[in-house]
Amino acid sequence: MSGRGTALRTAGALAAAAAVGHAGPAVLGRGSWRRHAVPGLLGVGAPGGVALTFDDGPHPEGTPAVRRALDALGVRATFFVLGSQVRRHPGAVASLLADGHEVALHGFEHRNHLARTAPALTADLRRARAAVLADAVAADVGQEPDEVARWLRFTRPPYGAVSGGTLWAAHRLGLRPVLWTAWGRDWLARTPEQVAATVLADLLRDAPGPAGGGGTVLLHDSDCTSVRGSWRATAAALPRIVEAVRERGWEVRRLAEHLDRARPSSAPAGDGAGSPSRGGSDR
Ligand SMILES: [Zn+2]
């Protein structure tokens, strides 16, 4: 992408992103102090590994592009899907599960939790979970709905904006809220090199030693709240990111494996998600 049209689209998208709150992660997602203050919420996992997570999908082009890149690298990741996007793109959740990826909930609508009530957030998460289960069942992934529901262990509020209502709603559904320790700022107009460099700088800032790792990376397989086509740079950055992670002796894990190794009994109790002992590692 280049030229004046792109610049205008980018400027417009940036303005739109700012308007809907993409400044939120800039405040809530950075700062090593947060890693020490709320490691569980941030998704600090066991040393020796890194979890790759993708928000805002599924997307008809972005999600397959990211899936292809991950498959070529031989790694599995976690996708925080939007229920509204799942409804628009039937079969996408089933494809992710078939590839061995983990599916988690970003919500049904991409709205800032700070402006919503706890009952509204609970209803939103329930609607998102229903959309995911319906897609998995319709595509016949070979699992019963309650079994698929047990895979849905994690939730991440849009913009990383956590309210009391976020925590209450997550608890009601037996979901664990998880943010991130590193990001690629890939909702902006960036090159694959920039996305990878930002991710790696964050990972190394928090865990510079050989026994480091433990980071959770925020990326996006969809441009539904980002600069148009932003997923292209994200997908193209993955080989650089995974190669650099492996060079440090770390492995790439799904979030369930990543967090279970760090805190084996960390999942909350609730009315919906079932056994915390089951995760993405066994499918
Ligand atoms: Zn999002």
Image (spheres, grey):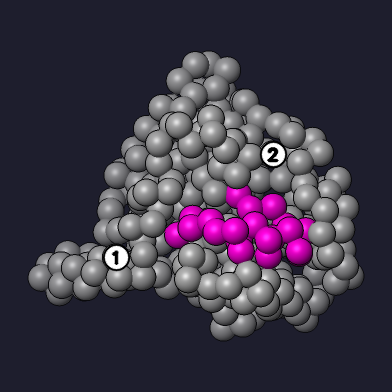
Disc 1 Cβ-to-ligand 1 distance below 8 Å: no
Amino acid type indicated by mark 1 = Ala
What residue sits 61% from the left and 82% below the top?
87
Residue denoted by label 1: 18
Return the x and y of residue 66 as percentages of the image width and height: 51, 58
Front residue of this view, candidates 255 and 192: 255
**241 falls in the magenta region:** no
Front residue of this view, candidates 66 and 137: 137
What residue sits 29% from the left and 44% below the top?
194
Return the x and y of residue 105 as percentages of the image width and height: 64, 64
Q: CA distance from mark 1 to mark 2?
A: 31 Å
Q: Is residue 11 above or below residue 213?
A: below
Residue denoted by label 2: 259
Q: Which residues are magenta?
A: 159-178
Amino acid type indicated by mark 2 = Leu
Depth-wise, is mark 1 or mark 2 nearer the camera?
1
Q: Residues within 10 Å of mark 1 (few under 14, many from 20)?
A: few
What residue sits 54% from the left and 49% below the top?
179
